[in-house]
Image (tube, rainbow, N blue to C red):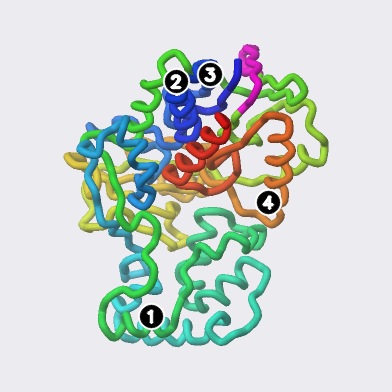
Amino acid sequence: MKYVILGAGPAGLTIGNMLLRAKETSFVILEKEAVAGGLCRSTLVDGAPFDIGGGHFLDVRRPAVNRFLFEFMPESEWDQYDRVSKIRLGAEIVDHPIEANIWQMNVDSQVEYLASIARAGCVTGSPMPEKFVDWIYWKLGDRIADEYMIPYNRKLFSDDLDSLGTYWLDKLPSVSFEETLRSCLTHRAYGAQPGHARFYYPKKYGYGELWLRLAGALDGHIEYGADVKAIDFDAKAVQTADGRRFAADRIITTIPWAGFTRISGMPEDIRSGIRMLRHSAVETRYYGGRLDTDAHWIYEPDPWAAHHRILVRHNFCPGSRGYWTETRSDRIGLIPEGGRGNYHYENPYAYPLNTIGKPAIIRRLLDWAASRGVYGVGRWGEHQHYNSDATVELAMKMAERMQM
């Protein structure tokens, strides 16, 4: 056929629907699981939706993406929220981002944080360091680094933070001493808003419902239970774990490159680059009851707490109760036996890690693969930490290029 698409997550479903709208029917989507949605799948737990991949929300900032998605799940089926996210710092809880909300701390802490920011290398003009940990201190000051950024990133990504590069850190806020001081004096946040400052979440369903709708529009074009394990660049074909073989003019992969157990026709230096890619696995775990907070989610940098984030379900999912936590899989042993919740799900591929050298590896991999008619897109096809709305945007653009 013309196209084989690997993975029925946001990227694969978007490309499939874009092809179908262009009257292209010679394609199939191969999905390992029994249902579509990838990391954005939902299930019912305790009578309400539980998003097994963690906190996924639809940002309002990409109107073209939202117009496309609302064709499958109309805007009337969504609630819109102004983001309330918080950070637990010992006995204090402040709004995120921390540098804009230091004013919510006690006065002594405000003075200490302000002094720390004033000494930060990016404020004093010292050269930018190359190592991740040094960069955090240079960018944010030692107080934010020690109490929040360093312990939180260790919990989320890796205990070895210096294995990460610094090329992606321009996404972090530019901490201005003047703006931070102004926020402390006026008791209001200054500076840029974080991602998902305003977001949509379904009124009656989990986030996974959206992707089930996209999958429903592709009836007959999705093969479920198709766990692709091998790819042959010479034959331009893939093979599933149970031996089914699919060939196409073009292969579009949205699944992890590291998930291929057999790769044929690829130079060894590119294959060795794939083996150097790193990712984290994350467990989501549900707990009943209610938390006394208006937050949609809470960041938890405390190294003695196993989880790094709490999603407060009853504050964004109407009619529900309880909350769920996100915990890097190799920290699960830190969860006390008596507090292990009611339901849990482990995602073996959760976050691509921005390790040193990754950009060069991915650039060479994707350029070489594209020259053979194989294209990577989305969080795993490009090994980039994209949110679902960014993934849909990239997939829409790829589908348009494919039809040119």
Judge by depth and name the residue closer to the eye, 362 or 356: 362
- The mark found on residue 34 in the picture is 2
Which residue is found at the position 47% from the left and 16% from the top? 221
Residue picked out by circle 3: 28
Res 135 → quadrant: bottom right
Q: Earlier in the sequence, mark 3 or mark 1?
A: 3
Q: Residue furthest front?
A: 404
Residue picked out by circle 4: 358
Magenta stretch contains residue 152: no
Q: Earlier in the sequence, mark 4 or mark 3?
A: 3
Mark 4, other Cα within 10 Å: few <14 / some 14–19 / many ≥20: many
Give the CA separation, mark 3 to mark 1.
Answer: 52 Å
* Residue type, label 3: Val
Where's the N terminus, which quadrant?
Answer: top right
Residue picked out by circle 1: 180
Secondary structure beneath dot 2 equals loop
* Residue 39 place in picture, x, y as percent: 45, 37
* Residue 10 place in picture, x, y as percent: 45, 35
Instruction: Tell me the magenta residue range.
Output: 239-251
- The mark found on residue 246 in the picture is none
Question: Taking 277 as reference, is 402 left or right?
Answer: left
Secondary structure beneath dot 4 equals helix
* Residue type, label 2: Ala
Kindly indicate whether the residue at mark 3 contacts the one at mark 4 (C-beta within 8 angstroms). Answer: no
